[in-house]
Image (cartoon, helix red, strand yellow):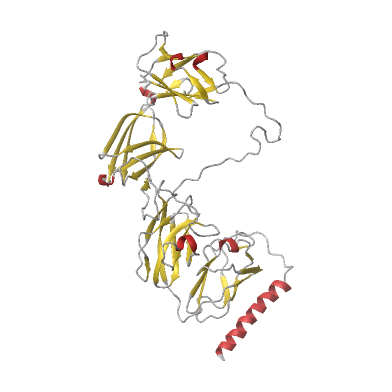
């Protein structure tokens, strides 16, 4: 009798809400007043939140304000992960979810809406709103959490997901859908809730349709051992890697046409650019590079001459064409504050069309002074030198320098000015480069730890910094 009264009361409440929303639809809300900053809250649910012994696959949620639910489908995570996507409908204050899969016995289900629920007027998001029910007598309460870090950079990728497989076969990640999955947040953290006790294999993948490791260029990570889910499961760190890098392919149906499909006149001249910065040579770089717009067929190093200001040829410099046959490097031990000349004769290079540069050129080169650089002193604390640490100095997301760390203090008399990011590679095999992982061989990638301190180097200045690992 009590259950019947509760059932009647619930539907009477829904009818009352519907009557207000339809009968008073033309009412105009008052203007002015403070902006609404409160996200929608659950007002009622059928079955109720955290209900047990549930047999229906239809869920009705009623909120305290009008709902914008257009993002529910792409945000909703249902655990266990269903074979078929649910039917979702939203109207006014109501959200209805109909599960297409048959409910499993004695199973806890959770529906995490992520950022998919928000109000109509102010777009206030009910972040990570979750609804839970069970087909058994209890609600599972076990939690599994941790962090996901990109092994090569030490950075975070919030587009990744963590998947749990009940099938413990090593090939399950290639063939099967996961039992559970959850997202990585903006800080690299993840958390599973309402898990049953048991053993699982855990992996990290992109959040794509397959949720399988079917491409070795995908970001991927794996746990070294089985995850035992119980009341005392400890957090786990995952280090994601790409076993193979995806090649960038630029598509172009007509490379000689511009955006208006007009034929583009081909430049038939042989041209070049240099690595000089406003005719100035960096004394910390041994090479002055000359890059051509075409491949070089023939090359005469004797016709590229480096001289002093009086046209006297220098000694001990070298001129070399790279293997790609588009760049010539003039290598020299550059001294500060010098004025030099680089003579490039017309016949020095010939491209594959037997063309040479239009005329002989003489470049005036000024080498930088020591005052154009700053000195650099870094002291490391809490650093385990036995792990073969390598300091990675990053400029514009590229490695400007990789410096093996063999002692606590690092000093450079001259260093290029700039704003650098710092990270440390723990070089397991001591080959001075980052090495990727391999799941089949159970080899984890080498790990890079991003440091939370930036390096700012000023010219003509003693730059000192302490780095704690």
User: Residue at coordinates 29% horizontally, 36% vertically from top-left?
Assistant: 410
Q: Quadrant of residue 7?
A: bottom right
Label total for image: 0
Task: Look at the image and tell me whether residue 265 can be seen.
Answer: yes
In the image, taking residue 183 as reference, residue 461 lies left or right, namely left
Which quarter of the image is occupied by the N terminus?
bottom right
User: Residue at coordinates 74% horizontally, 68% vertically from top-left?
Assistant: 26
Q: Quadrant of residue 59?
A: bottom right
In the image, taking residue 410 as reference, residue 191 lies left or right, namely right
Q: In this view, does 88 lie above or below 324?
A: below
Towards the viewer: 83 or 278: 83
Q: Quadrant of residue 467?
A: top left
Task: Look at the image and tell me whether residue 342 can be seen.
Answer: no
In the image, taking residue 280 as reference, residue 355 lies left or right, namely right
Q: Is residue 383 above or below residue 10?
A: above
Towards the viewer: 410 or 401: 401
User: Could you say where residue 108 lies in the image, as x and y percent from the top left?
Assistant: 48, 75
Towards the viewer: 187 or 124: 187
User: Could you say where residue 352 lies in the image, as x and y percent from the top left?
Assistant: 55, 23
User: Could you say where residue 408 lies in the image, as x and y percent from the top left?
Assistant: 25, 40
């Amino acid at each position: 009798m009590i259950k019947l009264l509760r059932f009647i009361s619930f539907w009477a409440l829904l009818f009352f809400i519907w009557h207000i929303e339809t009968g008073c639809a033309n009412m105009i809300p008052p203007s002015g007043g403070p902006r609404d900053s409160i996200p929608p809250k659950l007002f009622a649910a059928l079955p109720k939140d955290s209900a047990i012994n549930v047999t229906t696959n239809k869920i009705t949620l009623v909120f305290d304000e009008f709902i914008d639910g257009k993002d529910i489908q792409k945000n909703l995570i249902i655990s266990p992960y269903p074979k078929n996507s649910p039917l979702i409908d939203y109207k006014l204050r109501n959200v209805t979810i109909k599960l297409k899969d048959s409910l499993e016995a004695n199973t806890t289900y959770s529906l995490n809406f992520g950022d998919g629920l928000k109000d109509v007027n102010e777009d206030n998001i009910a972040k990570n709103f979750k609804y839970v029910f069970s087909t058994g007598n209890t609600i599972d309460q076990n939690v599994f959490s941790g962090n996901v870090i990109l092994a090569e950079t030490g950075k975070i990728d919030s587009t990744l997901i963590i998947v749990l497989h009940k099938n413990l076969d090593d090939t399950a990640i290639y063939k099967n859908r996961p039992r559970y999955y959850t997202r990585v947040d903006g800080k690299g953290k993840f958390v599973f809730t309402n898990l049953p006790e048991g053993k699982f294999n855990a992996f990290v993948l992109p959040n794509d349709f397959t949720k399988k490791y079917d491409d070795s260029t995908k970001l991927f990570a794996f746990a070294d051992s089985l995850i035992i889910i119980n009341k005392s499961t400890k957090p786990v760190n995952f280090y994601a890697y790409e076993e193979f890098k995806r090649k960038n392919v630029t598509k172009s149906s007509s490379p000689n046409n511009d955006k208006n499909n007009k034929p583009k006149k081909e430049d038939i001249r042989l041209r070049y650019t240099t690595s000089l910065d406003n005719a100035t040579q960096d004394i910390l770089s041994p090479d002055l590079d000359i890059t051509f717009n075409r491949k070089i067929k023939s090359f005469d190093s004797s016709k590229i001459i480096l001289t002093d200001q009086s046209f006297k040829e220098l000694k001990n410099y070298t001129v070399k064409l790279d293997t790609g046959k588009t760049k010539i490097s003039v290598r020299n031990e550059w001294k500060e504050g010098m004025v030099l000349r680089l003579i490039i004769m017309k016949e020095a290079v010939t491209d594959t069309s037997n063309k040479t540069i239009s005329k002989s050129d003489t470049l005036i080169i000024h080498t930088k002074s020591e005052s154009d650089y700053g000195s650099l002193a870094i002291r490391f604390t809490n650093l385990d030198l036995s792990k073969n640490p390598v300091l990675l100095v990053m400029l514009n997301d590229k490695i400007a320098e990789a410096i093996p760390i063999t002692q606590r203090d690092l000093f450079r008399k001259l260093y290029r000015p700039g704003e650098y990011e710092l990270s440390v590679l723990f070089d397991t095999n001591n080959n001075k480069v980052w090495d990727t992982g391999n799941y089949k061989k159970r080899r984890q990638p080498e790990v890079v730890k991003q440091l939370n301190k930036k390096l700012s180097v000023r010219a003509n200045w003693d730059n000192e910094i302490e780095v704690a690992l």
